[in-house]
Image: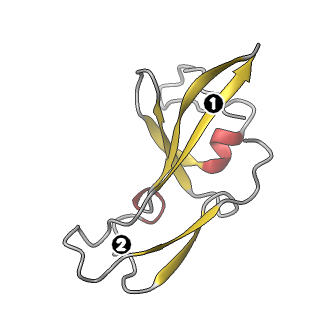
Amino acid sequence: MGDLEWLSYEWFRSSQSPAPNYVHPVIRIYVGNLSNGQIGDRGYLIYERIYTLGMQPAPTDQWVFEEIVASNSRVWQNPIGGGNFFDAQPFSVWQSETGYQPRDGNRVDVLLI
């Protein structure tokens, strides 16, 4: 994760969609740390525009290019096997040496570097 410099995808939303106007296709990135031959800290980093751009309407009837890492967009984590959903943080936080630190300052050992 620490070496990931660029990650993007393209999406299309029809103006005929009945979903709220800020909803768009999301991307989930499966991640896990390899330690002593075992994968730990498994989960998904999830990008949704709302956590970076707020509830502004998603573009419709056009292809949209979404860059996540280089733009340091906010992503949140859904851990596999239980645990809490973690606050949306800039991508660089998930790549950092210290990992994610919750607002209350208690370490949760989520290192995805």
Residue appearing at x 72%, y 38% in the figure = 96
Q: Secondary structure at mark 2?
A: loop
Q: Is residue 86 left or right of residue 90?
A: left
Q: Position of residue 74 (x, y in %)?
A: 53, 53
Please state the horizontal and vertical placement of residue 6, each as a whole percent of the image.
Answer: 72, 60
User: Is 53 located above or below residue 40 in the figure?
Assistant: below
Of the two numbered discs 1 and 2 in the rendering, the one whose residue sits closer to the viewer: 1
Q: First in sequence: mark 1 or mark 2?
A: 1
* Residue drawn at 33 percent across, 75 percent down: 57
Identified by mark 1, the residue type is Gly
Please name the amino acid that badge 2 sits on: Gln
| Residue occupying the point 44% across, 21% down | 81
As drawn, the residue found furthest toward the bottom would be 61
The crowd level at tag 1 (other Cα within 10 Å; few <14, some 14-19, many 20+) is many
In the displayed structure, does residue 87 sit left or right of residue 35? Answer: left
Which label is found at residue 85? Answer: none
Q: Position of residue 97 (x, y in %)?
A: 75, 32
**105 or 99, nearer to the observer:** 99
Residue wearing tag 2: 56
State the residue in front, 100 or 80.
80
Q: Please identify the quarter of the rendering in which residue 111 is found.
A: top right
Closer to us: 102 or 83: 83
Q: Residue furthest front?
A: 37
Mark-to-mark CA distance, 1 and 2: 32 Å
Scheme of image coloration: secondary structure
Query: For the N terminus, which image quadrant?
Result: top right
Instruction: Provide the residue designation for mark 1.
Output: 32
Tell me the crowding category of disc 2: few under 14, some 14 to 19, or many 20 or more residues within 10 angstroms, Cα based: few
